[in-house]
Image (spheres, rainbow, N blue to C red):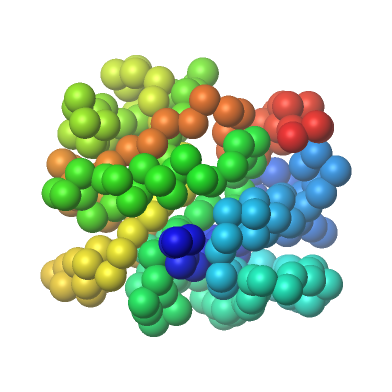
Amino acid sequence: MTQTFRALLLAAGLGTRLRPITLHTPKCLVNIGGEALLGRWLRQLELAGCEAVLINTHYLADQVEAFLQSWKSSTMSVKAAHEPELLGTAGTLISNQDFFRGATGLLIHADNAMAGGLDGFLTAHRERQPCCQLTMLTFHTDTPESCGIVEIDDQQVVQAFHEKIANPPGNRANGALYAFEQDFLDHLSLMNQRPSDFSTEVIPKLLGRIQTWHTHDAYLDIGTPEALTSAQKLMRHK
C-alpha cells in the first residue's frame, strides 16, 4: 500500500545572497535544468505519490501564487499559505501542523535542488529506528563550513550536529529535508519556548532521535550565484 504523505515547501525567503537575480524573481522560481526550482520539487513530490503540498509565501508572493495557479495535477493538491511576516522554518511548520493530520509529513527547504527521487528517503523513514522521531536527508558537501554537518552512529542516527562552523568534523551535510509523524509535531508543541529556526532550535534537542538517509545523487543549495551556476550545469539533464 502506498504511504500517504503531505509536504510543506518552505519558499518564502528573500534570497538576498542571490541578488540581483532575486530582486525581481523569488528564489524558488529560479530556473534549474529547464524548469523553476519550485516546479522541480512539485514534480518530484507528485512522482513519489504525495497527496497534498503547502507552500509558504512572503517575498514576491504574487509571482509564486501565479506559478502555483498554473500548476496542474490530477493527483496532488497544491496550495499557498501567505505569511505577512516570516515565521521562521520551525514557526511555519508549527503554524500549519493541522495540514499534516493523519499523514506522514515532509518539510522541505525549496531553495535546494535534488537530482534523485524521494522513494529511498520515504522507505528509510518507514524503516527508521524505533527511537527516532525525525528522518533527515543527508548529502556529501565539498564546503562543510557552509552547511550543518552531522555525525551518525552505526544505525545512521544523528549523534552530533554542527551548524556552519569552521573545520567541522566531516562532510555529511544536513539536506534540510525531513520526514515525521504526529509524535514529532506533538513534541514541537510541548517545547518550553516555541522554536522559530529548525536547524538551531529543534535539531540540537533531538540528538539520538533523528534517522538519516544519505543520497549519492547531486543535491545542492542554490543560495549563491556560484552555487546556482553549478546547479544549472549538474541538473541540466536530471
Q: Position of residue 84 (x, y in %)?
A: 57, 80
Residue at horizontal 44 percent and vertical 43 percent from the top: 121
Q: Quadrant of residue 114?
A: top right
Residue 11 is left or right of residue 60, and the answer is left
Q: Quadrant of residue 71?
A: bottom right
Q: Position of residue 135 (x, y in %)?
A: 33, 48
Q: Quadrant of residue 107?
A: bottom left
In the displayed image of the protein, which residue is found farthest to the front? 1
Can residue 86 be seen by looking at this rendering? Answer: yes
Q: Position of residue 141 (x, y in %)?
A: 49, 23
Residue at horizontal 58 percent and vertical 28 percent from the top: 217
Residue 101 is left or right of residue 84, and the answer is left
Residue 27 is left or right of residue 195, and the answer is right
Out of 171 and 13, give the one closest to the viewer.
Answer: 171
Can residue 22 be seen by looking at this rendering? Answer: no
Name above or below for residue 185 compared with residue 156. below
Q: Position of residue 188 (x, y in %)?
A: 24, 67
Which image quarter holds the N terminus? bottom left
Residue at horizontal 56 percent and vertical 63 percent from the top: 50
Residue at horizontal 46 percent and vertical 67 percent from the top: 4
Residue 162 is left or right of residue 214, and the answer is left
